[in-house]
Image: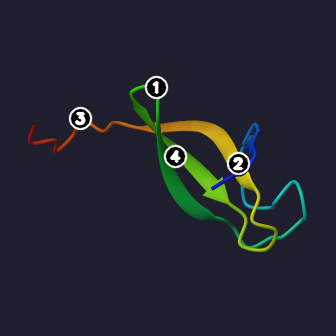
Amino acid sequence: MDYKVHQVDPGEEFKVCPECSYKDGFHSMFKKEDGAMKWLFICPSCHQVFDVGFTVDITCGNNT
C-alpha cells in the first residue's frame, strides 16, 4: 500500500486532522520500521497517515 506519512507535532492534543480539518479523532495503525513498531494515525475522512513520534515496545509479551 502506497501512502505518505506526514510528520506532525501533536502539541497538547492531536484530534483535528491538519490536512482536511476532520475533528473527531483518528484510527490507529502500527508499522514495523527499523526494529521498532511505529504507532501511526489515520484520518477517517481523508485517509492521510500521520506520525506524532510514538513507538510501541514490541518486546513486551514476546515469547520468542
Mark 2 lies on a secondary structure that is: strand
Q: Which residue is mark 3?
A: 59
Q: Give above or below for 38 relative to 15.
A: above
Asked if the residue under mark 1 is in contact with the one under mark 3, i.e. CB atoms within 8 Å, the reply is no
Q: Residue at x 89, y 65 (%)?
A: 21
- Which residue type carries mark 3? Thr
Q: Could you classify mark 1 by the number of other residues whose Cα lies within 10 Å: few (under 14), some (14-19), or many (20 or more)?
A: few
In the image, is 35 to the left or to the right of 29?
left
Q: Which residue is mark 2?
A: 50
Asked if the residue under mark 4 is in contact with the one under mark 2, i.e. CB atoms within 8 Å, the reply is no
Q: Could you classify mark 4 by the number of other residues whose Cα lies within 10 Å: few (under 14), some (14-19), or many (20 or more)?
A: some
- N-terminal label among 2 and 4: 4
* x and y percentages locating residue 5 in the rendered image: 72, 43
**Marker disc for residue 39:** 4
User: Distance between the Cα atoms at labels 2 and 1?
Assistant: 18 Å
Q: Residue at x 55, y 60 (%)?
A: 28
- Which residue type carries mark 2? Phe
Instruction: From the image, state whether disc 2 or disc 1 is nearer to you.
Output: 1
User: Distance between the Cα atoms at labels 3 and 2?
Assistant: 24 Å
Instruction: Assign the N terminus to one quadrant of the image.
Output: bottom right
Q: Residue at x 16, y 41 (%)?
A: 62
